[in-house]
Image (cartoon, grey):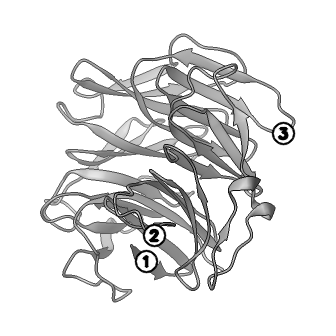
Amino acid sequence: MSQWQDNNLYQWVDTEGPQWQPYSDVTDQLNQIWSDAEYVYAVTTSGLAVTEIESESLYAYAGFSGGYTTVWANNTQLFLGTENAGVRTINKSNITGSIVSPTDISSNINNYLDDNYLTSNNITYIHGYDDRFVCCTASGIDVVKLNPFGYVNSTTEDIAYKCFMTSGQSFYYTTTSGSDYIINRVDRYKSDWTAADVMYKTGTSWLPEYAEVKDIFVTTNTSSVSGYNTIFAATTSGVCIYDEGSTTTIIYTTNSMLAGSSDDITSVWADSDASLNNGKLYAASVGYGAAFSIIDMTTQSLFDHYTLYFAGRAGETLNADDVEDLNIVLGS
């Protein structure tokens, strides 16, 4: 676990391996993290661990058979994906604990949706915004309206990896077709759909040929053309940034801006107003020469970076060279 704090931001870096453990089982594997200003919510192969940011200590935990696969939260609720039980949820107000004696909150987690509504009980990824979320499953993609519970819309898809719900009307998800990776965009979420409105395929659009798309992040209405978004994609060929309005692309690699020596980018994050020439971009790589890079898009310069040996502005090095996930929130 590594924490990056600068300009009132908290940055948590997630690496593969036995950590964030609510139990003593050393075979635990971390699947994903989500955080807010107070806690980091880590889902593992044995359950949920809630870590208090200020003390960096375990605060609460909840075991679950088979563990949790993915996690996302809005201001009031935490949503947890499972391999065979659909989506489960807990109200944040019911997450109580103590860093002296962490609390078991298993009884406060309830079933939310299963395959009576969803395309599958096997949930691989969840991402949302405010009162709605999109999730990838073993059989498709589902869009869920929260309170009041209004609809679940979906499409069938054999292989969907990551998804992203914007603050506007659109959402995105990644799929594959043979050896090609595709970023799909759907412009409305009020009815089922059979095909995405826009498909960006590696080698035929702004995504490099033969690249794998490992993560996506989208900022709403940040294009140089009013009404369009900016896409940030983590690929095995660097970070690809695309202005959907102007159709302009920037690709950052270790030969141009990124720190370290690995262009295998596993995770990407951006400020909510980030674009081709504004805000900050955050990218993590994996393998020999892995690094966590912060790019100032306004000045087109490397603002800060961290590796196993370089401590950056926060004076803290990475714990491992296998960074798999980033989560950034405003600090208190």
Q: Gap between marks 2 and 3, in whole Å?
A: 29 Å
Q: Is residue 299 above or below residue 268?
A: below
Q: Which residue is mark 2?
A: 12
Q: Nearer the viewer, residue 163 or 140?
A: 140
| Number of numbered discs overlaid on the protein picture | 3
Image coordinates for residue 302, horizontal then vertical, percent: 29, 71
Image coordinates for residue 201, horizontal then vertical, percent: 31, 25
Q: Amino acid at mark 2?
A: Trp
Q: Nearer the viewer, residue 138 or 213?
A: 138
| Residues at discs 2 and 1 in contact (Cβ within 8 Å) | yes
Where is the N terminus found, in terms of image quarters? bottom left
Image coordinates for residue 268, horizontal then vertical, percent: 39, 54
Q: Amino acid at mark 1?
A: Gln
Q: Gap between marks 3 and 1, in whole Å?
A: 34 Å
Question: SS class of the residue under badge 3?
Answer: loop
Give whichever of discs 2 and 3 has the lower sequence position.
2
Residue positioned 28% across, 81% down in the render: 317
Q: Is residue 181 above or below residue 196?
A: below
Which mark, by number, is residue 209?
Answer: none
Question: SS class of the residue under badge 1?
Answer: strand
Q: Nearer the viewer, residue 38 or 332?
A: 38
Query: Which image quadrant for residue 191?
Result: top right
Q: Which residue is mark 1?
A: 3
Which mark, by number, is residue 147?
Answer: 3
Q: Is residue 278 visible?
A: no
Where is the C terminus found, in terms of image quarters? bottom right
